[in-house]
Amino acid sequence: MAKEFPRLDESLTEFINDQAMFFVATAPSEGGRINLSPKGYRDTFAVLDDHTVAYLDLFGSGVETIAHLRDNGRITIMFCSFTRNSRILRLFGTGRVVRPDDAEFGELVGHFANPHAGVRAVIVVDLERIADACGFAVPYYELVDERPVLDDYHSKAPDEAYVRLVGRNRRSIDGLPALDADHPLPRSRA
């Protein structure tokens, strides 16, 4: 039922690219809350090589993933098929945050077809374990469309809104440091 893979091969990459969403899980080193976030926009995820993936981290409701990665780097990404072909794929690894003001950001953003407004960072994950599971109990769902609300919000938001977002994203809900308000992120526009 479950299988571990030595690398992301063409078949696994195709499965990843076929999914409309993915989930990201992180946790602080001590105490605190576990964070589990659904991520949409299928064009915000990229396989960089057979042991490295990345995704666009868009401004949203919280900054837990960034805070947890700064704390310990641990991250798990899960893809789950809701179609007739059941499958769950988990990518376990060590993540790092690449901000728009980092030199590496421009090169990384080139891996994404749609630049999306409101990009807070690129999360890069070096994979340590790649494993699937059957997903036999996962229900069938039919994708209607991607929800445009976040893209619409970010494309209309004035630059001052991002200064406020950086301020609100200084710490996680458990008080861990996340974004540095002294170095606000440049706004990434579509």
Image: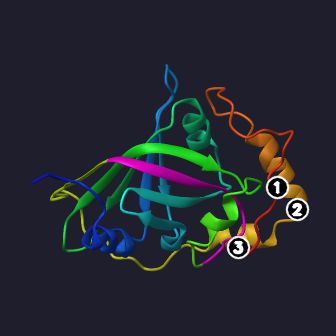
- Asked whether the beta carbons under mark 3 and mark 1 sit within 8 Å of each other, the answer is no
**Secondary structure beneath label 1:** helix
Q: Position of residue 7 (x, y in %)?
A: 28, 58
The residue that appears at 82% across and 58% down in the rendered structure is 186
Three-letter amino acid code at the position of disc 3: Asp
Three-letter amino acid code at the position of disc 2: Asp
Residue labelled with disc 1: 162
Figure colour scheme? rainbow
Q: Is residue 40 left or right of residue 85?
A: right
Three-letter amino acid code at the position of disc 1: Tyr
Q: Position of residue 19 (x, y in %)?
A: 37, 70
Residue labelled with disc 2: 159
**How far separated are the C-alphas under marks 2 and 1?**
5 Å
Q: Position of residue 34 (x, y in %)?
A: 46, 33
- Asked whether the beta carbons under mark 2 and mark 1 sit within 8 Å of each other, the answer is yes
Q: Residues within 10 Å of mark 3 (few under 14, many from 20)?
A: few
Which label number is shown at residue 152? 3
Select label 3 or label 1 by which is in front.
1
Q: Give, as a single range, the part of the protein colored magenta.
A: 114-128
The residue that appears at 46% across and 65% down in the rendered structure is 48
The residue that appears at 50% across and 45% down in the rendered structure is 95
**Secondary structure beneath label 3:** helix
The residue that appears at 65% across and 49% down in the rendered structure is 61
